[in-house]
Amino acid sequence: MSHTPITVAYGDGIGPEIMRASLFILREAGAALDLEEIEIGEKVYLRGNSAGIEDSVWDSILRTGVLFKAPLTTPLGGGFKSVNVTLRKTLGLYANVRPASSYHPFVKTNHPDMDMVIVRENEEDLYAGIEHRQTHEVYQCLKLITRPGTERLVRYAFEYTRLNNRRRVTVFTKENIMKFTDGLFHKIFDEVAREYPDLETEHMIIDIGAARVADTPEIFDVIVMPNLYGDIVSDIAAQLTGSVGLAGSANVGTSAAMFEAIHGSAPTIAGQGIANPSGLLLAGVMLLLHIGQREVAETVHNAWLRTIEEGIHTADIFREGVSREQVGTQAFAEAVVARLGQQPASLRPVSYAQGTSMPKPRPAALEKPAIKQTVGVDVFCTGQTPTANPTCWASA
Ligand code: NAD
């Protein structure tokens, strides 16, 4: 098998430990990867770079088009930009795919039948980063929802559903209040849904949808939603499975993709060798699927399931009476390696060898530009005191 070049960032906090453990498993399973290492995150911030990412590293990421990234620490206090948000926007990683499954009865959870995938829009919405101070007392953040951005995201969610033999796609919006922005998201969902008559669809208002995710997550299959809702709901879903340490995620765009654990750098347990590498490892499985190394992906995932069901657990999921042995990060990785080639006996084995389960991202269909005509302008002005120079809206 020819080797695929990928860019690797070891990250901060527990990042280097879980990345070393994950790469050890992938290598032992026979993944054909050429690793290019880059440094981003805390050390770069502390060198005085407020973006946390130096110009020189873009070269590698743009050349390989695949970034395997451990969690990064964003220093507290003003002035530091999130590297994660910069990466998603610069690379156009428009879809964030986050599976959340229970591993009952081997990992304690109140939701034994949960098996959902959240597909979150990753660039637009309130994360477009357009904020203004309008007056001394009024601050504004713009919520952007675009037709092309929503269309390619929603289509990716439908393609993912079909390729993975799933049945239903649910969309969450708050269109009863945000009729233009969330209304457009739902409208485009309905338009794209017509191209997938084999799949069931439904819509829920985000508040009741989130409540159902927290209460009866097993009723969901694939859920697609705008950025902010997806950020919040996908963390809730991951926590419901038993630990945030179990979930991986893929951020995909037409020219690059990034794979990471959903959790952060967990600074309080960093350096102790106790962190769970599973989230990053499962992101690595999605990476292998993305680059077409399906058999290795299947081998790794099944060996991991076998390790989990044999009760070999890191501290975050270890429970007396359920788990058999508490292990550290590296010992967990060695246990997975020892089971390469084995299938789980109780948990459902995965089967990736045929076909692919990560769809190819596609650009949105281009619409003809609308014919525009200037009919007026809106002017917003504000003064120091209401009496001397009142705030006003003017339209012309
Ligand atoms: P966190 O996810 O790092 O930790 C939350 C809790 O989960 C902690 O108790 C932690 O010990 C535990 N935990 C997380 N991952 C674990 C694992 N693999 N094994 C065992 N336990 C694990 O969230 P936080 O404390 O809010 O954030 C810490 C730092 O991470 C912050 O600087 C934040 O900005 C950053 N962060 C980065 C990313 C990313 O790089 N994608 C995501 C979220 C947070």
Image (spheres, grey):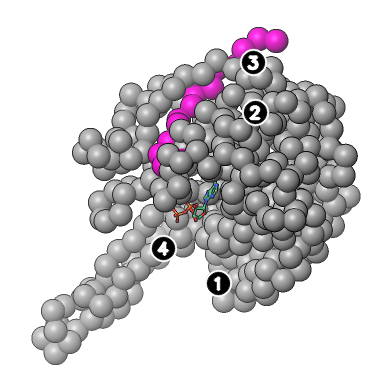
Residue 245, percent from left and from top = 59, 48
Upstream in the sequence, badge 1 or badge 4? 4
State the residue position of label 2: 334
Q: Tell me the SS state at disc 1.
A: loop
Q: Nearer the viewer, mark 3 or mark 2?
A: 2
**Residue name at image x 19 percent, y 84 percent:** 390
Kind of residue sitting beneath label 1 = Met
Q: Secondary structure at mark 2?
A: helix
Indicate which disc, 4 or 3, sits on the residue closer to the N terminus.
Answer: 3
Of the image marks 3 and 2, the number of the one nearer the N terminus: 3
For image coordinates 59% across by 51% down, the residue present is: 316
Q: Which residue is mark 1?
A: 178
Tell me: is circle 3 under 8 Å from ligand 1: no
Residue 10, magenta (yes or no): yes
Q: Which residue is mark 3?
A: 32
Badge number at residue 276: none
Q: Residue at x 66, y 19 (%)?
A: 28
Q: Which mark is residue 142?
A: 4
